[in-house]
Image (cartoon, rainbow, N blue to C red):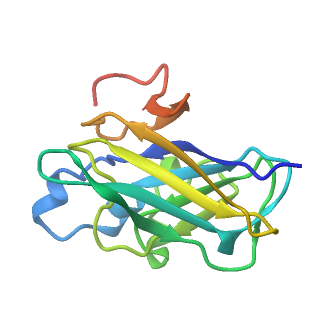
Amino acid sequence: MSTILRIYRAKPNPPGKNESQRAPVESEILLGEWVDIENVGTESITFSNIQLHHTLFNSFCQTRGGIECYWNAQGSGLLKPAQILRVHTGKQCGKAQLSSVDDGDTDWHAYAERDNFVLNNRCGDIIVITWMDDQGRSYKDAASYAPNPRAGAILVRLDNQLIQAEGESESP
């Protein structure tokens, strides 16, 4: 028996994110920033035992020595083996505006309920998931991506890196 979650995919730079930095952010753009978490273990994990974090950077793209909680799971639902949970930066009340790409092929959707973007494009980012099993043991997984991901690119896991999916065009 194993309780293993992993960062599976991410879309840190939805189309329109860079243009919205100086104006109020539209909810469909916020919903387009997301992270997928996959249960690759053999046991179900209660949502309330899962947290998603990202790394904090200074203006020189040096880590500030800490992580910030991006999303804290709520509820007693279960992420079963082989299921995928997509965490959107935006608010659940805007979920009707999800594009088909952002609605995606996932089993669950959760919302960070943020009014601003979280994932760092200029410096890249390190995304960390933490969770506890039913016996109270703590675990974590992390994956990072390089600075300046292409707008709209879906990054997939390769070792401990999130990279542009093969077959995806380099140009927007």
- Tell whether 124 sits left or right of 21: right
Instruction: Determine the residue positioned at 40% across, 68% down.
Output: 90
Residue 101 is left or right of residue 13, and the answer is right
Q: Nearer the viewer, residue 133 or 22?
A: 133
Figure quadrant of residue 139: bottom right
* Position of residue 10 measured from the top left corner of the image (x, y, whole percent): 47, 45
Q: Is residue 39 above or below residue 116?
A: above
- Quarter of the image for residue 44 reads bottom right
Answer yes or no: is residue 167 visible.
Answer: yes
Q: Please state, as top left, top right, bottom left or bottom right, where the C terminus lies in the image.
A: top left
Position above or below: 134 against 59: below
Please name the residue shown 35% across and 62% down the image: 30
On the image, the x and y values in percent for residue 32 come to 40, 55
Residue 32 makes an appearance in the image: no
Q: Quadrant of residue 121?
A: top left
Q: Is residue 6 left or right of residue 126?
A: right
Judge by depth and name the residue closer to the eye, 145 or 135: 135
Residue 128 drawn at (x, y percent): 49, 52
Q: Please provide percent x and percent y for residue 150.
A: 29, 34
| Front-most of residues 37 and 26 | 37
Relative horizontal placement of residue 99, taking residue 28 as reference (left or right): right
Tell me the residue at 78%/53% (across/down): 3
